[in-house]
Amino acid sequence: MTKLLQEKKSSVNLLTLFAIFTFSLHLLAAIFLLFEGLRIYGLIHKKPLTFVQLVDGKVVSQTDTLEREPEVIRQFVAKTMAATFNWSGTLPPATVEEATNPKTDAGIPVKTLQGLTKKVSTSSWVASFALSEDFRGGFLAQIADMTPLEIFSQNNKQALTGQLVIQRVYPPEKIAPGQWRVGMVANIVQVRRTDNKKLLTPFNKDFLVRTVDSYGHPLSNGLTPLQKAVYSVRAQKLEIYEVSDFCLTNGYDSSSKSQSQRCGDVLNSGSFTR
């Protein structure tokens, strides 16, 4: 009888050890799955590396997504505004044939702040995607008010062309991490094709620029030329989120900050100072 009790007690101990061992394996498996889940979650929400173009044209991978070369910021502002006021009456060439025989720009309808429907050039519409989303609508509405209807006219006697002639883009002034202020001195020059009569409109503005994230379209091979142009604008990972008047007190020399200052009301989604 004593021998049977000892054997029964021994079997109970082995069963307990087996249960503890099995529980430990399940616990380790649960910890491992939790660890892997956290890693996958981190990869999903991790920001991609930013590829920044330097002044010499080289593209480098950069982990700090808030930094940009000053010259890259200056060129971004200059190119965006030059494209915004590109009122040539023709579409940007997409092929070699269109470079010699460009297509006529029919314009893109835009609702103005007064509720009217006017047109902006295709170049202006594409360039507007370099602006923040909450700012873009109001900016386009004001550009539509400024755009002469004659640039879409097929009658050469009435047709106009317009472009932004930039005289100076000031070096970016850092105002916060990933944010800069850039001043520009320029003129909007409109030319009537028949007599080459010119109309000059000063365009001295102060731009607030910031870094943003952007992602390419997953089906890039199926995009239209217009869609590709929009994605190329956003690929610069910069955007303009505020514009105000830029006043000059002592010429264009930026050697002293006292020679230039911000003035006027800030350009927001509801106002634009011409």
Image: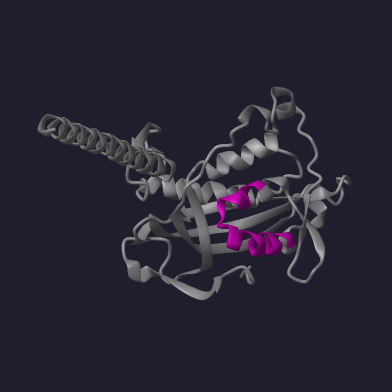
Residue ID at (43%, 49%): 73
| Highlighted magenta segment, given as a residue range | 126-144
In the image, farthest residue toward the top:
96
Residue 137 inside the magenta-drawn segment: yes
Q: Please tell me which residue lies in front, 78 or 133.
A: 133
Residue ID at (61%, 31%): 220
Measuring from the top left, give residue 170's x and y in whole percent. Answer: 41, 56
Q: Please tell me which residue lies in front, 17 or 86.
A: 17
With respect to residue 259, does 2 lie above or below?
above
In the image, farthest residue toward the left:
2
Is residue 63 visible in the rendered image? The answer is yes
Q: Report how many numbered discs are placed on residues in the image.
A: 0
Which SS does the magenta portion mostly show?
helix
Q: Please tell me which residue lies in front, 63 or 196.
A: 63
Residue ID at (67%, 50%): 124
In the image, farthest residue toward the front:
1
Would you say 179 lies left or right of 193 here? Answer: left
Residue ID at (62%, 52%): 128
Measuring from the top left, give residue 221's x and y in whole percent. Answer: 64, 27
Measuring from the top left, give residue 210's x and y in whole percent. Answer: 44, 56
The quarter of the picture where residue 5 lies is: top left
With respect to residue 218, does 192 lie above or below?
below
With respect to residue 121, does 203 lie above or below?
below
Would you say 244 lies left or right of 59 here? Answer: right
User: Can you say which quadrant of the picture contains the N terminus?
Assistant: top left
User: Can you say which quadrant of the picture contains the C terminus?
Assistant: bottom right
